[in-house]
């Protein structure tokens, strides 16, 4: 077995069916955990978009556009990784655009709640 830049990789069977966690093999464990992460991410995304639908048309369109553009850039960055000094520059920029949309959403919701709290008094 060869060393790769000072890293000694584990034997091949480590990634195959002989490595069991209880009665679930590693491939099944990874598939289940990935599915759970995807489901949680989709539920979170839909709840964020549901919060966005309560705004006026201009604000809603702006925030949804930032979410969609950020997600598209992030997915493209994850599918096509870059070979630059900083890994996944596209994924990083996509996540920052999505985060910017999320910050705008939080700010608008904060202002909405702040104005509501003074109207009730």
Image: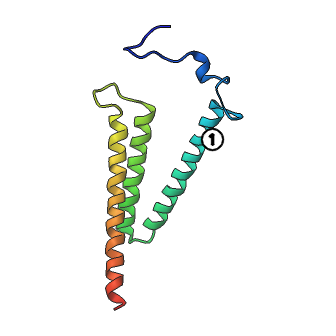
Viewer-proximal residue, 29 or 118?
A: 29
Residue 80: percent from the left, percent from the top? 42, 30
Q: Is residue 90 left or right of residue 54?
A: left
Give the vertical position of 117 relative to 63 (above or below): below
Residue at 63% x, 41% y is 32
Q: For residue 113, which quarter of the picture?
A: bottom left
The quadrant in which the C terminus is found is bottom left
Viewer-proximal residue, 9 or 88?
A: 9
Residue 85: percent from the left, percent from the top? 27, 27
Give the vertical position of 54 relative to 87 (above or below): below
Residue at 33% x, 60% y is 103
Viewer-proximal residue, 61 or 2?
A: 2
Residue 68: percent from the left, percent from the top? 42, 51
Residue at 29% x, 31% y is 86
Identity of the residue furthest to the bottom in this view: 121
Tag 1 secondary structure: helix
Q: Is residue 32 left or right of residue 106?
A: right
The residue labelled by disc 1 is: 32
Identity of the residue furthest to the front in this view: 22
For the rendered model, the colour scheme is rainbow
Residue at 36% x, 83% y is 116
Identity of the residue furthest to the right in this view: 23
Task: Determine crowd level at label 1: few under 14, some 14-19, many 20+ residues with C-alpha closer than 10 A.
Answer: few
């Amino acid at each position: 077995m060869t060393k790769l830049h000072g890293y000694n990789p584990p034997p091949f069977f480590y990634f195959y069916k002989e490595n069991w966690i209880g009665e679930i093999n590693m491939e099944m464990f990874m598939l289940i955990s990935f599915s759970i992460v995807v489901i949680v991410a989709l539920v979170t995304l839909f709840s964020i978009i549901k919060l966005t639908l309560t705004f006026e048309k201009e604000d809603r369109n702006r925030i949804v556009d930032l979410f969609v553009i950020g997600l598209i850039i992030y997915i493209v960055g994850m599918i096509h990784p870059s070979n630059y000094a900083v890994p996944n520059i596209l994924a990083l920029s996509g996540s920052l655009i999505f985060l910017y949309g999320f910050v705008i959403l939080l700010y608008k919701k904060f202002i909405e709640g702040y104005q509501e709290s003074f109207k009730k008094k």
